[in-house]
Image: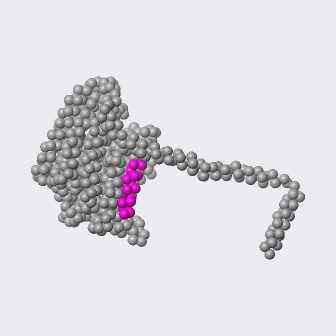
């Protein structure tokens, strides 16, 4: 089979799984639906590996496979093909989405075992992965837009999966609406590019960058595409849907926040790097947004009590690192951190799922504590994930995060130092909130709730094999994933991703000295945060009082009031305006006339009813009068 054949088959496998599960419905046991979904993901991953190996063995200048199966839309000069662009960038995304997605599917077999809607869940999961593969393998902006919208729809279905919960329904709506804002920006950006260049094909768009620049539309195009990236990747100011998305099942959180949805924005900027490399203003804006977001998310995570929300805000912070990387022009570093982040973030979410399972859906860390005695293996797994998250080398997150920060030193200037300083501050905050979670969940005295619930699981272990083995695999990847790019030792990421600029420029690559200097500073900051966390929370009491924060701590605890801000400047004015329109326009000019139709028709009918007397002489008289009136009319006209 050719490389493109492997890619198309890998691309189609999750769709086949989704369709099979839907068609089989309740004709097969619930367990079969999960096995079908897992088989589809395994096939997708294996075929993706074969395609990757074919691509890797080619010379750098030949690592591009484009294939079209039909022309989907054609009108005048406009043409949109259903085709793929398989290059090193999409190859990396294919492996991450299908590989980590497969492990999450297997984990879901155990996690969703007792859910009556297990079939629907796995159909949605396969649909989500298929949508993401459309997004990352699309050969043009229109097909990417299709995948972009389908990912939004799939996330809506999965976040609101437990639709009997009002909070889940509200969270799904919020995520959908917030991402729809990004979809509009992406769509307008696509229309602008087509209007100026007459094409939506990636490689033709890249070749047309000088035209966009000469016409003064390059910054506009990059800015509009960035709106879509910010919404999908939950970056400020379009990030408020992220914590509410935790209302979905934990495997959904792992899939959305590790391997799929939130990485889409980083992928988009990296994919369109020939445009962003020439748009200095927008690239600098990306760095500033990333620097602000990673510090803000770290502060918010420090004051959260829901175990999944803490990890969710860590996702926002880590994605912000990736945005800084691609904004600095170190596209390989942003993608490197995307890969390693998928390993340790899926590990953390799935480890949190084991804890939640053991405590019968309890997610408040104040009601945990001392769980290392009941969940020893999970404790070790969460340590590995936390060390990778904090960036302690040699765990995977260390090398990849430090590659981004050292790229700031290489770029230099104000923007480079903003990235470096923000990254070091972020490393300190990451150590602080990560080890706060570890100490409050697994160490100290058990809360009364945990002391009562946790021992109930000791007779059947920490979970079924389907939940544990995927987490073991992710722990191994989180431990050795950093070997992909060690300064002065290995350079697989830079070598493999070299062709993604399509000859339009070079990616930023720091020196070995800059990388090791940054690593020393970042590790020191992370360890300092970890030590401080031990001093503050290492000796947890059995009962942690639930009291509101005071002073400046109110801001991060209330998420810096972003929801209140949107409520004040968007929701309330819109609601007030709609009420006024309803009262003074809709009711008097639309509802009132329509409401009058019924009484008026009844009145007319009543009048005709009175005339129906049944007296023949009266009918003859009316007929004669009518004929006479017509004759008189004809005579007057004559």
Q: Does residue 191 belong to the magenta stretch?
A: yes
Up-down: is 482 above or below 212? above
Q: Position of residue 15 (x, y in %)?
A: 38, 54
**Residue under the image location 83 percent in, 70 percent down:** 631
Q: Most prominent secondary structure in the magenta stretch? A: helix
Up-down: is 224 above or below 316? below
**Residue under the image location 87 percent in, 61 percent down:** 620
Q: Position of residue 502 (x, y in %)?
A: 24, 64
**Residue under the image location 35 percent in, 57 percent down:** 224
Up-down: is 239 above or below 371? below
Q: Position of residue 448 (x, y in %)?
A: 32, 24
**The residue stretch that appears in magenta:** 176-192
**Residue under the image location 39 percent in, 46 percent down:** 175
Q: Is residue 468 visible?
A: no
Q: Residue 521, located in which quarter of the rendered image?
A: top left
Indicate left or right for 573 with 282 as reference: right
Q: Nearer the viewer, residue 153 or 478?
A: 153
Q: Does residue 188 belong to the magenta stretch?
A: yes
Indicate left or right for 16 with 93 as reference: right
């Amino acid at each position: 089979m050719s490389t493109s054949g492997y890619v198309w088959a890998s691309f189609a496998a999750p769709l086949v799984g989704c369709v099979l599960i839907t068609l089989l419905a309740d004709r097969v046991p619930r367990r079969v639906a999960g096995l079908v979904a897992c088989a589809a993901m395994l096939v997708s991953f294996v075929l993706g590996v074969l395609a990757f190996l074919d691509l890797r063995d080619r010379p750098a200048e030949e690592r591009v496979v484009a294939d079209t199966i039909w022309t989907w839309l054609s009108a005048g000069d406009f043409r949109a093909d259903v085709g793929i662009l398989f290059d090193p960038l999409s190859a990396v995304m294919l492996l991450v989405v299908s590989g980590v997605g497969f492990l999450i599917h297997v984990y879901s077999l155990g996690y969703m075992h007792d859910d009556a809607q297990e079939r629907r869940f796995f159909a949605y999961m396969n649909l989500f992965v298929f949508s993401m593969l459309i997004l990352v393998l699309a050969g043009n902006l229109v097909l990417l837009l299709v995948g972009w919208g389908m990912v939004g729809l799939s996330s809506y279905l999965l976040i609101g999966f437990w639709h009997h919960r009002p909070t889940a329904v509200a969270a799904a709506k919020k995520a959908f609406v917030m991402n729809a804002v990004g979809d509009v920006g992406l769509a307008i950006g696509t229309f602008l590019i087509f209007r100026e260049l007459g094409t939506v094909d990636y490689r033709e768009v890249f070749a047309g960058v000088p035209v966009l620049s000469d016409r003064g539309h390059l910054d506009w195009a990059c800015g509009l595409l960035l709106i879509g990236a910010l919404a999908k990747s939950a970056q400020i100011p379009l990030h408020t849907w992220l914590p509410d998305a935790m209302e979905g099942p934990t495997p959904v959180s792992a899939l959305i926040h590790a391997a799929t949805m939130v990485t889409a924005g980083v992928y988009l900027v990296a994919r369109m790097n020939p445009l962003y490399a020439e748009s200095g203003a927008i690239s600098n804006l990306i760095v500033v947004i990333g620097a602000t977001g990673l510090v803000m998310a770290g502060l918010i995570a420090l004051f959260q009590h829901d175990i999944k929300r803490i990890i969710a805000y860590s996702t926002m912070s880590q994605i912000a690192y990736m945005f800084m990387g691609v904004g600095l022009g170190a596209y390989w570093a942003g993608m490197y951190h995307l890969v390693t982040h998928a390993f340790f973030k899926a590990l953390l979410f799935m480890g949190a799922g084991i804890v939640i399972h053991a405590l019968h859906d309890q997610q408040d860390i104040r009601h945990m504590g001392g769980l290392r005695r009941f969940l020893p293996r999970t404790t070790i797994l969460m340590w590995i994930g936390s060390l990778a998250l904090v960036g302690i080398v040699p765990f995977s997150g260390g090398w990849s995060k430090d590659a981004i920060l050292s790229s700031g030193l290489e770029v230099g200037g104000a923007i480079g130092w903003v990235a470096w300083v923000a990254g070091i501050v972020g490393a300190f905050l990451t150590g602080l909130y990560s080890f706060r979670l570890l100490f409050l969940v697994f160490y100290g005295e058990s809360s009364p709730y945990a002391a009562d619930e946790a021992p109930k699981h000791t007779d059947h272990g920490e979970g079924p094999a389907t939940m544990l083995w995927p987490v073991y695999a992710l722990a191994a990847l989180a431990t050795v994933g950093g070997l992909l790019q060690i300064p002065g030792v290995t350079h697989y990421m830079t070598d493999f991703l070299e062709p993604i600029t399509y000859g339009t420029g070079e990616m930023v690559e720091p020196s070995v000295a800059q990388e090791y200097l940054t690593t020393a500073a970042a590790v020191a900051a992370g360890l300092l945060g970890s030590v401080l966390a031990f001093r503050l929370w290492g000796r947890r009491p059995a009962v942690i009082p639930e009291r509101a924060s005071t002073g400046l701590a109110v801001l991060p605890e209330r998420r810096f009031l972003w929801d209140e801000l949107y409520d004040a400047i968007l929701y309330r004015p819109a609601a007030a305006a709609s009420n006024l329109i309803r009262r003074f326009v809709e009711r008097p000019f639309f509802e009132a006339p329509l409401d009058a139709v019924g009484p008026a028709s009844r009145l007319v009918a009543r009048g005709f009813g009175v005339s129906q007397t049944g007296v023949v002489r009266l009918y003859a008289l009316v007929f004669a009068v009518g004929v006479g009136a017509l004759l008189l009319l004809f005579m007057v006209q004559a």
